[in-house]
Amino acid sequence: MLELKTRKTQKQLVPETGLTLLDHALKADVDWGFSCTRGTCARCRCYVAVGRELLSEPSEAEEDRLEPEELEQGYRLACQCIVKHVGPISVTHKPYF
Ligand code: FES
């Protein structure tokens, strides 16, 4: 299961490989703030609490936009982060503002 949390809502859906976390949020009608979908605005920033190993490696855009410490701690950009393997994943929307 993929759990998506925002300040206002929490939804669970079946994860699909090849889709980004943002794709999943949009599909599930979760109000997940985003703008560029290219990894530059960081509005889609999120914290992956569970299932980091099931996701793609950080993209070049994520490495440019996020601090190394943030990536290490589990922060990702939902528009860049692709589900690679199915399993339990829990993600919380954590934009900077
Ligand atoms: S939507 Fe802009 S960084 Fe993801």
Image (spheres, rainbow, N blue to C red):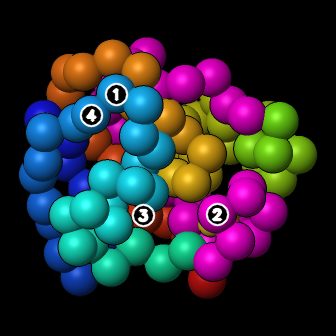
Question: Considering depth in this image, is 77 or 8 the residue closer to the camera?
Answer: 77
- For the residues marked 2 and 1, what is the alpha-carbon distance in whole angstroms? 18 Å
What's the amino acid at mark 3? His
- Does 94 sit left or right of 26 as displayed? right
Q: Position of residue 4 (x, y in %)?
A: 25, 56
Residue topped by disc 2? 37
Question: Eyeballing the image, is 65 above or below 57?
Answer: below
* Range of residues picked out in magenta: 35-59
* Disc 3 packing (10 Å; few <14; some 14–19; many ≥20): many
Between marks 2 and 3, how big is the CA–CA gap? 15 Å
Q: Can you identify the residue that label 1 sits on? A: 17
Q: Is mark 2 within 8 Å of ligand 1?
A: yes
Q: Quadrant of the C terminus?
A: bottom right
Q: Secondary structure at mark 4?
A: loop
Can I make out residue 69 in this image? no
- Residue tagged by mark 3? 93
Real-space Cα separation, disc 3 to disc 1, in angstroms: 20 Å
Q: Are marks 4 and 2 in contact (CB under 8 Å)?
A: no
**In which quarter of the view is residue 69 placed?**
top right
N-terminal label among 2 and 3: 2
